[in-house]
Image (spheres, rainbow, N blue to C red):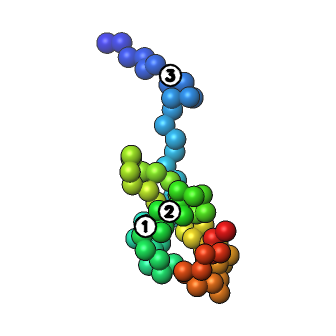
Amino acid sequence: MTAAILPKIPPSRARPTMPDLADYMTPHEAAEKAELHVNSIHRLAREGKIDFIRIGKKAILVSKKSVERYLKETEGLDKRDPTRGK
């Protein structure tokens, strides 16, 4: 019986490694932490103000460090302040 030789996958088609999920939270958890609506978290991610990774086509996970950074940058500002996040 001969062993099957598997084709090598070129680096451009290799799957990326999964990040450590302990460093990420759901948008709902981020919204609770930041005292914002979940839609605001999605908007901040879209605008590049917080880091996220995409899981599948629609779901995202938000970086805990980027949420902390955003909260420090906007500390003392009211959540309805138009200058918050600029």
Between the residue at mark 3 and the residue at mark 1, the CA separation in whole angstroms equals 42 Å
Residue at 58 percent across and 63 percent down: it is 50
Left or right: residue 86 versus residue 23 is right
Which one is nearer the viewer's eye here, 66 or 6? 66
| Residue placed under numbered mark 1 in the picture | 39
Left or right: residue 15 versus residue 2 is right
Between the residue at mark 3 and the residue at mark 2, the CA separation in whole angstroms equals 40 Å
Q: Is residue 57 above or below residue 36?
A: above
Q: Is residue 67 above or below residue 79?
A: above
Q: Quadrant of the N terminus?
A: top left
Q: Is residue 35 above or below residue 46?
A: below
Residue at 50 percent across and 53 percent down: it is 53
Precedes in sequence: disc 3 or disc 1 = 3
Percent x, y of residue 4: 38, 17
Percent x, y of residue 32: 44, 78
Kindly report which numbered mark, 3 or 2, lies closer to the viewer in this rendering: 2
Can see residue 29? no
| Residue placed under numbered mark 2 in the picture | 43
Residue at 46 percent across and 51 percent down: it is 54
| Residue placed under numbered mark 3 in the picture | 8
Percent x, y of residue 58: 38, 51
Which one is nearer the viewer's eye here, 44 or 26? 44
Instruction: Look at label 3 and name its amino acid.
Output: Lys
Which one is nearer the viewer's eye here, 23 or 45? 45
